[in-house]
Image: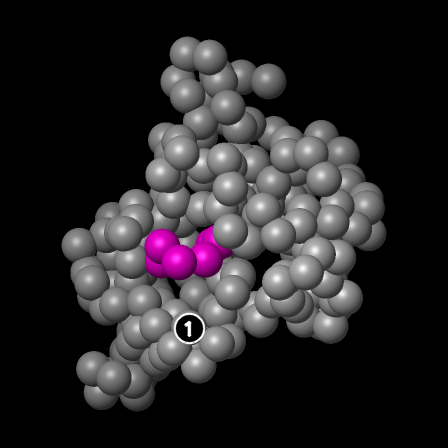
């Protein structure tokens, strides 16, 4: 493994992963943020990007299992799970600005060079300028959906998906930073197609798709490293 790029060498047993996620999330202490010493309850489930479809297929089942679970302790309850897909949030943001049709209309002209580099791809540069790190609309929309669901008792856990679909104009580590202090009454779980790793020198890093340059992020807990 190189110092600059993290690779994903083998397939994961997604059935086993989600069985562990279920055990962790059914525990009342997870949903109450016990033992976090005041830190935000942000979690990451990282997985090989090649298994994206498997993960997406498992998420509704996990949600159903959690929302119909039988509490093991008096006073506990089956949690409601709010799922927010970042791609849907992006579409909603463009619709709110009344520019979605315009963006779709100019895509063909702007995509003369197709690249993940926003400096080379003029269309991605446009999206990055509208929705990137300095834009507030995406975190504002996430916060609004969360607050509405929370007020109705429908957000005991928040799942955020669609990370790979909105790269590079929305970056996961930047988004999590902007959500600090906004999502503070329930656990936030980011489903991440890549590698979230802790290193002694550089600290925790996020490597999307297991091959892109790393982004430093240290405030989330790796669900696969937690005991169930």
Q: In the image, 72: left or right of 111?
A: right
SS class, disc 1:
helix
Q: Position of residue 189 (x, y in %)?
A: 52, 53
61 or 27: nearer the eye?
27
Q: Which residues are magenta?
A: 183-188
Of helix, strand and loop, which mostly describes the magenta segment? loop
Looking at the image, which residue is at 42% across and 73% down? 150
Q: Position of residue 2 (x, y in %)?
A: 53, 17
141 or 55: nearer the eye?
141
Q: Dividing the image into 4 quarters, which one contains the N terminus?
A: top right
Q: In the image, 50: left or right of 4?
A: right
Residue 121 seen in render: no
Q: In the image, 187: left or right of 180?
A: right
195 or 31: nearer the eye?
31
Q: Which residue is mark 1?
A: 150
40 or 123: nearer the eye?
40
The part of the image, by quadrant, that contains residue 65 is bottom right
Q: Position of residue 164 (x, y in %)?
A: 50, 55
């Amino acid at each position: 493994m190189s110092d600059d790029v993290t690779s994903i060498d083998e397939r994961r047993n997604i059935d086993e992963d989600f069985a562990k996620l279920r055990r962790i999330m059914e525990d009342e202490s997870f949903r109450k943020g016990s033992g976090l010493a005041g830190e935000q309850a942000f979690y990451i489930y990282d997985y090989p990007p090649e298994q994206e479809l498997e993960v997406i297929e498992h998420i509704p089942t996990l949600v159903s299992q959690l929302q119909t679970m039988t509490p093991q302790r008096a006073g506990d309850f089956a949690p409601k799970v709010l799922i927010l897909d970042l791609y849907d949030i992006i579409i909603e943001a463009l619709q709110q600005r009344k520019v979605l049709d315009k963006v779709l209309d100019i895509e063909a002209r702007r995509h003369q060079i197709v690249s993940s580099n926003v400096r080379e791809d003029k269309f991605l540069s446009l999206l990055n300028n509208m929705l990137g790190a300095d834009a507030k609309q995406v975190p504002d929309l996430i916060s609004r959906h969360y607050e509405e669901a929370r007020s109705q008792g429908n957000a005991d856990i928040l799942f955020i998906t669609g990370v790979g679909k909105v790269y590079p104009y929305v970056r996961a580590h930047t988004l999590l930073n902007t959500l600090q202090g906004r999502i503070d009454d329930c656990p936030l779980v980011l489903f991440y197609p890549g590698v979230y790793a802790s290193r002694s020198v550089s600290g925790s890093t996020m490597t999307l798709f297991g091959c892109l340059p790393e982004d430093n992020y240290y405030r989330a807990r790796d669900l696969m490293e937690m005991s169930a």
